[in-house]
Amino acid sequence: MKEGTKILLLEDNPIHREVLFDGLEDAGATVRKAESVVEARSALMSFVPDLLLFDIVLGDNRAEVLQFVDELRRRERLRDVPVLLVTAYLEEVSQEVLLRGIPETAVLAKPFTFDDLMKRIATVLKER
C-alpha cells in the first residue's frame, strides 16, 4: 500500500474500528472511519477514497452494507473504487457477495492478522 492511500473504514465494533484505524494510519494510510452506513455515506460527501474497507455485517443486519455497495457502484465518482469486505460470517454472506460480482479476493474472513489485511489490501488495489 502506498503512503497516503485513502481508505474509508466502515466497522461497527468500536474496538475493531480503532485497532484497524490505528494500524492503517501507522502503515501510512489516510483513514476516515464510520460506524454505520449513514456515517459512511456522509463521509463520502467530502472524501473520495482509494479503497472501501467495510465490515459486511453491522449489528444483526446482513443486507445493509451490500446494498450500500450496490448504491456506490451506481455513483459515477465512486463506481471504480475497490471494496474489501471483512466478515465473521463468510458462509452466510458468500452467496450474496458472489451474486454481486465481488471477487473472492475482495472478501477477508475474520479473524485475520494485520499482515493478512495488508496483503489483501495490496491485492485488491492491484486488481483495480
Image: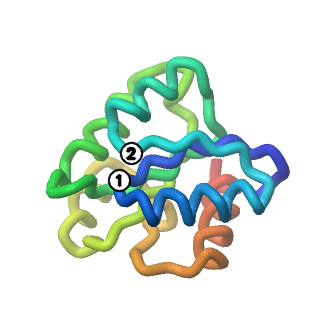
Q: Residue 12 carries which label?
A: 1
Q: Are marks 1 and 2 in contact (CB under 8 Å)?
A: yes
> Is 128 situated left or right of 78 in this image?
right
Q: Is residue 48 visible?
A: yes
Q: Which of 94/30 is in front?
A: 30
At which x and y percent is residue 105?
51, 66
Q: Where on the picture, by quarter, is residue 23? A: bottom right
The relative height of residue 41 versus residue 54 in the rendered view (above or below) is above
* Amino acid type, callout 1: Asp
> Is 49 situated left or right of 5 in this image?
left
At which x and y percent is residue 95?
22, 63
Query: SS class of the residue under badge 1?
Result: loop
In the picture, which quadrant includes the N terminus? bottom right
* Amino acid type, callout 2: Glu
Q: Which of 61/35 is in front?
A: 35
At which x and y percent is residue 30?
71, 43
At which x and y percent is residue 9?
51, 48
Q: Residues within 10 Å of mark 1 (few under 14, many from 20)?
A: some
User: Which residue position holds label 2?
Assistant: 35
> Is 65 situated left or right of 5 in this image?
left
Mark closest to the chain's N terminus, 1 or 2: 1
Q: Which of 60/86 is in front?
A: 60
